[in-house]
Amino acid sequence: MATVSLNVSTVKPLGDRVFVKISEKEEKTAGGIFLPDTAKEKPQIGEVSAVGAGKLDDKGVRQPLEVKIGDKVLYSKYAGNELKIDGVEYVLLAEKDILAIVA
């Protein structure tokens, strides 16, 4: 079995896919109580690290994505495929799974 070495700068999503760096999990509650790892919720906010060229429509014209590298986005809770590269967590999503750009 061949091993593949992934690097964030070499990952290029295809079509309407977006590569997002997952934000850090909350370490404590608003009241100051520290959370154990088992009680932490999976974050749904991240920063776009790479984007695909866009989806082809019925006429073969490429539709550009609404998000760009560096955008902070809110995405569906169970969407995409999670990857861990160099100890950092990422998720590979379809653009339709992105709910909003966070200002």
Image (spheres, grey):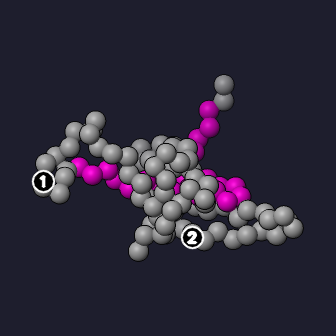
Residue positioned 19% across, 52% down in the render: 29
Compare marks 1 and 2 and give the one earlier in the sequence: 1
Mark 1 sits on what residue? 32
Mark 2 sits on what residue? 68
Instruction: Estimate the x, y position of residue 41 in percent, counting from the top left.
Output: 33, 45
How far apart marks 1 and 2 lie (CA) works out to 35 Å
Q: In the structure shown, which secondary structural element does the residue marked by tag 2 occupy?
A: loop
Residue positioned 17% across, 57% down in the render: 30
Instruction: Estimate the x, y position of residue 89 in percent, counting from the top left.
Output: 44, 47
Height in image: 36 above or below 76?
above
Q: Which residues are magenta?
A: 3-27
Residue sticking out furthest to the left: 32
Give yes or no for residue 53 being in the magenta stretch.
no
Q: Is residue 2 left or right of residue 46?
A: right
- Neighbor class of circle 1 (other Cα within 10 Å; few <14, some 14-19, many 20+) is few
Q: Is residue 14 left or right of residue 94?
A: right
Q: Quadrant of residue 95?
A: bottom right
Q: Quadrant of residue 96?
A: bottom right
Height in image: 46 above or below 40?
below
If the image is split into quadrants, where does the C terminus sit? bottom left
Q: In the structure shown, which secondary structural element does the residue marked by tag 1 occupy?
A: loop
Q: Amino acid at mark 2?
A: Lys
Residue sticking out furthest to the bottom: 103
Residue positioned 49% across, 67% down in the render: 100
